[in-house]
């Protein structure tokens, strides 16, 4: 076994590889770019070498520099992770030339599977079923068009060198073919430097089911069952699970053996994945499932942890053993599936804005602490810590959440809980979107296909999980709790003395989903807190109660009881409160001007406006004798009416405004003799 390896990658996969190496007593060398000088992967490795600028071409793709780093540190082997140099045949060769072991397949296998068209020609010979299509070398546009016409539409044009969901065009009709071909070729040459394409039948509502394979240098090759990666956006995976729902033993064996045949056809060694597209006529008809080879990924896959979860194996350990010349630890008949596993990719992106990646810093980053966490049924693979940034240079994946359960239903429940416990503040992520997906009828009942996200669109986008009233109540409770903890002398933070003043109100202004709202908190005679949240559909009012529970608050308001955690985050001039609750997370802007301007009275009987607004009415006139708590005036601000009550018994001397008048914050409304 190696004594020291270099990890030619970054982020979660570099950390993942380092963890296994450490467990096996293998020293690790990290490489890092300028942007990654303080990155987690640098911290978790034993040594680290700076290899250049932040852009991948200046660092993680500079293989001469990486090989030099390996030599300088005495590493014996290089683990490429995924992405970057992992499927670069020349890099694999260069490692060998430099006397280093490339922890991956032989260069020839990478080459053979590198181009989709060529690999299909190979697979055809090996008897692996293919999607009907054209994958020969002749790229004459007229020929491609004729092939597409004879296949029947829709067809899919794919860049042969493509990857990561890029370089694909669906063509619905013959008239659109020429334009789609030209645009696909443009993207292919720009992204992959190669404009060769293949054309294949576009399978309707297919599933993506892939087989994990493993080969060794002794001629053994096994399959570690399947992963269903049908839930995709932009042809990229979002959720992956194993085993595939509805899979039969017979089909599993057929697909597994086809994958092994594919691997053997290229003398495969190490971890690889054979991706199949699966046609089905219905969701519960496994006998209708027909599988076709799509491509082989000659590396460890992002979603490998679900396979680890159901097999109990460490695939990185297997990679290291195989690369050092050991035979595969287990034979096919020794491999078993235990329970069900699901992985969710947490990405810095905005699902409501076409999944555009976002950058920013992880002001708050808390991982799940749910009960199953301690039992090892929830795993988080990441390459970041709280405070780290998601930069524009690399992938937008923040973390992977992997859950395991005895059944799919149990795994699903754990995933929902783990997602609800994931707290990220500082940048937009798909965490809520993931929760919405797993709660859809389609996902919950395993009606899977690659169109799931489109089909469930209504339930997935622009969903508000908590609602204004509960969100506002959480922020108010959190503010009060915080003030009380700080003991900063705010009237609401200490009960004593306050009661003597009678009813007091305090006002909070909010902007929620683009609209302004106000909430009025009244400290009642019985010392309870009464909250009224002005909602567009009518006010919600009731008693607000809260108590501390670890790092969260239990709140109860208007018939709802929940556990919330609130984080305030400055965005420009705005104070944005992020509210996390078991049922979901949301954000609300707290309008500063009102957050602290609450007192409606001061000693000496001055009654002032708590906020800028309009006087709606007075319910008293000069000379009236009033009791503490009696309504005196109604003001309107921020879409809601606000009743100003007498702070104490007294006599109204003079009204200083008339209904309809605009008043500034702090202006005296009426004179009261106490
Ligand atoms: P998978 O099936 O494992 O998700 P992908 O082809 O989507 O495979 O890519 C795997 C990972 O590698 C993704 O996170 C992707 O963003 C990253 N990746 C793919 N190609 C590159 C590349 N050329 N440079 C850097 N990262 C890449
Ligand atoms: P990449 O290299 O980008 O991963 P793939 O060939 O693996 O490209 O295809 C990516 C995704 O595109 C698949 O997971 C599937 O959702 C979709 N796809 C690919 N081929 C077809 C097809 N023939 N019919 C329908 N969908 C397809
Ligand atoms: Mg693929």
Image: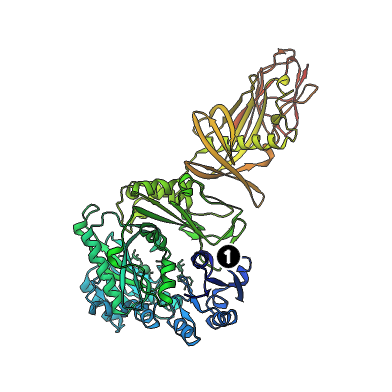
Q: How many marks?
A: 1
- Please tell me in which quadrant of the rendered image residue 120 appears: bottom left
Badge 1 crowding class, 10 Å Cα cut-off, few under 14, some 14 to 19, many 20 or more, is: some
- Which residue in the structure is indicated by mark 1? 44
Residue farthest right in this picture: 604
Q: Element under label 1? A: helix
Residue 272 x/y as whole percent? 37, 71
The quarter of the image holding the C terminus is top right
Decide which of 38, 424 is in the foreground and name it: 38
Q: Position of residue 234 (x, y in %)?
A: 40, 62
Q: Quadrant of ligand 1?
A: bottom left
Instruction: Farthest residue to the bottom: give it.
Output: 97
Q: Is residue 438 visible?
A: yes
Q: Which sits in the foreground, 218 or 505? A: 218
Q: Picture coordinates of residue 550 (x, y %)? A: 58, 39
Q: Give the residue drawn at x 61%, y 53%.
A: 363
């Amino acid at each position: 076994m190696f004594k020291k390896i270099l990890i030619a990658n970054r982020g979660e996969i570099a950390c993942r590889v380092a963890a296994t190496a450490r467990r096996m007593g293998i020293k690790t060398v990290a490489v890092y770019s300028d942007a990654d000088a303080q990155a987690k992967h640098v911290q978790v490795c034993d040594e680290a070498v700076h290899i250049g600028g932040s852009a991948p071409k200046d660092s993680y793709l500079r293989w001469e520099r990486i090989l030099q780093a390996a030599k300088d540190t005495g590493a014996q082997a290089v683990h490429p992770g995924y992405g970057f140099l992992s499927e670069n045949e020349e890099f694999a060769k260069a490692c060998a030339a430099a006397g280093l072991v490339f922890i991956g397949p032989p260069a020839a296998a990478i080459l053979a599977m590198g181009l989709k068209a060529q690999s299909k020609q190979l697979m055809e010979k090996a008897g692996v079923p293919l999607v009907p299509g054209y994958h020969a070398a002749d790229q004459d546009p007229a020929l491609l068009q004729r092939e597409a016409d004879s296949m029947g539409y829709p067809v899919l044009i794919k860049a042969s060198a493509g990857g990561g969901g890029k370089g694909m065009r669906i063509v619905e009709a013959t008239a659109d073919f020429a334009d789609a071909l030209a645009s696909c070729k443009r993207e292919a040459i720009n992204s992959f430097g190669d404009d060769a394409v293949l054309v294949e039948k576009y399978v309707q509502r297919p599933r993506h089911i892939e087989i994990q394979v493993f080969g060794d240098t002794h001629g053994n090759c096994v399959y570690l069952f399947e992963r269903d990666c049908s839930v995709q956006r932009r042809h990229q995976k979002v959720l992956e699970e194993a085993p595939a729902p509805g899979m039969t033993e017979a089909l599993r064996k057929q697909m597994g053996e086809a994958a092994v045949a594919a691997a053997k056809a290229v003398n495969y060694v190490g971890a690889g994945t054979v991706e199949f597209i699966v046609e089905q006529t219905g969701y519960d008809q496994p006998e209708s499932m027909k599988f076709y080879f799509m491509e082989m990924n000659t590396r460890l896959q992002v979603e490998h942890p679900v396979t680890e979860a159901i097999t109990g194996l460490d695939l990185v350990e297997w990679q290291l053993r195989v690369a050092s010349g050991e035979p595969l630890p287990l034979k096919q008949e020794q491999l078993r599936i235990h329970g069900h596993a699901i992985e969710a990719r947490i990405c810095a992106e905005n699902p409501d804005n076409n999944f555009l990646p976002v950058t920013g810093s992880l002001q708050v980053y808390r991982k799940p602490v749910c009960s199953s966490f301690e039992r090892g049924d929830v795993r988080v693979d990441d390459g970041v810590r709280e405070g780290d940034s998601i930069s524009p240079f690399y992938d937008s994946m923040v973390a992977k959440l992997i859950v395991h359960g005895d059944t799919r239903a149990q795994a699903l429940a754990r995933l929902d809980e783990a997602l609800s416990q994931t707290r990220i503040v500082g940048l937009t992520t798909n965490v809520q979107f993931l929760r919405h997906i797993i709660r859809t009828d389609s996902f919950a009942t395993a009606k899977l296909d690659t169109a799931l996200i489109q089909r469930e669109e209504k339930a997935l986008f622009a969903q508000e999980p908590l609602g204004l009233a509960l969100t506002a109540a959480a922020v108010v409770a959190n503010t009060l709790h915080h003030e009380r903890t700080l003991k900063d002398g705010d009237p609401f933070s200490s009960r004593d003395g306050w009661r003597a003043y009678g009813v007091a109100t305090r006002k909070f202004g909010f902007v929620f989903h683009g609209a302004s709202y106000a909430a009025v908190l009244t400290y009642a005679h019985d010392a309870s807190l009464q909250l009224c949240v002005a909602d567009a559909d009518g006010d919600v009012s009731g008693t607000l109660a809260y108590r501390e529970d670890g790092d969260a608050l239990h709140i109860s308001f208007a018939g709802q009881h929940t556990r919330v955690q609130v984080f305030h985050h400055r965005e420009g001039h705005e104070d944005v409160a992020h509210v996390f609750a078991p049922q979901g997370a949301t954000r609300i802007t707290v309008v500063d001007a009102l957050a602290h301007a609450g007192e409606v009275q001061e000693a000496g009987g001055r009654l002032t406006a708590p906020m800028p607004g309009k006087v709606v009415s007075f319910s008293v006139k000069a000379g009236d004798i009033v009791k503490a708590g009696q309504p005196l005036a109604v003001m309107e601000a921020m879409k809601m009416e606000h009743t100003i009550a007498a702070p104490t018994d007294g006599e109204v001397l003079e009204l200083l405004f008339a209904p309809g008048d605009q008043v500034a914050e702090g202006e005296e409304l009426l004179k009261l003799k106490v």
